[in-house]
Amino acid sequence: MSWIATAILSIVAVEVVVRLPFMPLARRAEATARRALHTMNRPRVSDHWKEKVMLAHAGAMMGCSLRLAGLLILLFAGVGALAWGLDFALPGFLAFLTGLIGLGATVVFATAWAVARPRMLGLFGANARAEADGKGV
């Protein structure tokens, strides 16, 4: 039963990661870093102006980092609470989950779901569109 609970926990974790804005924040941080590098590599920009611009870029990077940290805390708190709840229903689940086999199973289940998820959503989306059109699949 711990294997099924691990699979469910992994699927829930992947779904939470997909729905939280991790990627937009990471892209924003990367774009800010690129702009900062571009500014620093321009020989015609004065050092005074570079200092002012870099301060703004550093503030933007700090904001992105804090938001990403907050999302990670939210993710870990939610998954931890779910795992703790599953431990009440299945005594010994946390011991299994934090063991080498449980951690490996979590990685395998989460990776498998992350890979299969787009295909499954595409399949279900095609079925829903066909049923809405009255054609069936």
Image: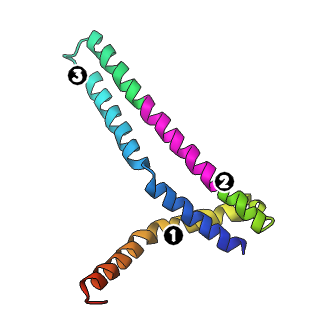
Please name the residue that numbered disc 3 is placed on.
42
Residue at 31%, 37% (x, y): give it: 31
Residue at 26%, 13% (x, y): give it: 49
Q: CA distance from mark 1 to mark 3?
A: 45 Å
Residue at 71%, 64% (x, y): give it: 86
Q: Determine whether, in the image, residue 6 is placed left or right of residue 113.
A: right
- Residue density around tag 3, few if under 14, some if 14–19, many if 20 or more, within 10 Å: few
Q: Quadrant of residue 46?
A: top left
Residue 118 appears anywhere in the view: yes
First in residue order: circle 2 vs circle 1: 2
Q: Position of residue 87 (x, y in %)?
A: 75, 62
Image: magenta residue range: 62-80
First in residue order: circle 1 vs circle 3: 3
Circles 2 and 1: CB distance less than 8 Å? Answer: no
Please name the residue that numbered disc 1 is placed on.
112
Quadrant (top left/top right/bottom left/bottom right) for the C terminus: bottom left
Q: Is residue 72 above or below residue 88?
A: above
Quadrant (top left/top right/bottom left/bottom right) for the N terminus: bottom right
- Tag on residue 80? 2
